[in-house]
Amino acid sequence: MASDVKELVKAILDKTDSLYVPKGKVTWRLPTGIPSLDKILGGGLPGGSIVQVYGPPGCGKTSLVYAVAGQAVKLGYKTLFVPLEGFSNQYAEACGIDIKSDNFVPISADYAEQIFNFTVEAVRNYDVKVVVMDSISAAVPKENLDKKQKVSNLDKGLKPGEKARLVGHFIEQLQAPVRRKEILFVTVNQLRSDIGKFVSGLKPGGGMALQYYSDIKISLWGKNDMAKQEIETSVRVDKGKDWDVIPFGVTTLYFHHAKGVDIERDILTVCEKVGIVKKSGSWYSYIDSKKKEQKYQGLDNFTEALRNNSALREELLQKATVAAYDAEIRKDGTEESEDGSVGTTE
């Protein structure tokens, strides 16, 4: 008579690390620090997932992933940052990244094969918890770098689809260790023209493998306000395999040039929606913890007050964060930990 299959699983697990038993639910989440985005994400980005952030140029993709990396470093997660489109220490710090922290590890390379191989090795064998890549579409295959420019029509050009094949292979190698080790992988992607169809349009590059393996897709579409030096961005989140929350959601974020996400405005937006901050005409009011009324005319004035009053900002941020962790969202036995992340209850 055959033995119990559990004994077979245990015997194989003792001999190899290629087989693992999936836990079947989210064990931790990384809050983005942006209350309205955390709310539609169910409290943050779930561990063990591949997240794709895409949109047209100038919509805030880099600013958003900088904010995510900053939160990861702040909460003590070892974060591998792969800047393939250039990296600015000044802007990274403005977006909240502590670049001097031991938890922040930036790395880049000359061509795609190098950086993809390094990332897979880091995820498989080292204590990385969060990987942020900006952007996967900027990784250039070595063959493209080695090949000379065409000087006549007789010269053979670059192989079509070479980058898509590389990205597909990379994601296929990455997805299993990401799930097994519950690592969060976040990558920026660009939009490219969808060639060969009757109706032209834009779609994320990198081939179909990246689209298939992405658990969460965050699309950004922004418009510039040069007078205020800010970008108003409509954000849509689509969650494919994270079924403990609604599989889609929409919010609006504001990005200031050279400063990143306008967190203060987002805090007030969430607090107003849930009734913590009251609006009457152009006036905004809030009763603080000392039972004192804070009253400001116009959202810009209230936002500026939060920037100048750290105690008031922290108080409203805590209330907005609690609103993001709605009781109806978490029915799977998870609870918020002291560091702001979400973990499984025993």
Image (spheres, helix red, strand yellow):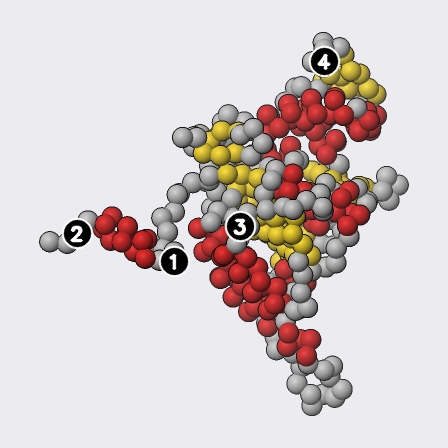
**Mark 4: few/some/many CA within 10 Å (<14, 14-19, 20+):** few
Residue at left offset 69%, top offset 49%: 61
Task: Look at the numbered discs 1 and 4 and tell me whether their residues touch, using CB distance below 8 Å.
Answer: no
Residue occupied by mark 1: 18
Going from N to C along the chain, the mark reached first, 2 or 4, is: 2
Return the mark for residue 287.
Answer: 4
Judged from the image, the secondary structure of the residue bearing numbered disc 2 is loop
- Measured in 3D between alpha carbons, the distance from the residue under mark 4 to the one under mark 3, in whole angstroms, is 45 Å
Residue at left offset 54%, top offset 38%: 29
- Measured in 3D between alpha carbons, the distance from the residue under mark 2 to the one under mark 1, in whole angstroms, is 22 Å
Q: Disc 3 marks which amino acid?
A: Asp
Residue occupied by mark 2: 3
Judged from the image, the secondary structure of the residue bearing numbered disc 3 is loop
Say above or below: 45 vs 55. Answer: above
Q: Residue furthest left?
A: 1
Residue 89 placement, left or right of 242: right
Say above or below: 162 vs 282. Answer: below
Which of the two discs, 4 and 3, sits closer to the camera? 3
Which of the two discs, 1 and 4, sits closer to the camera? 1
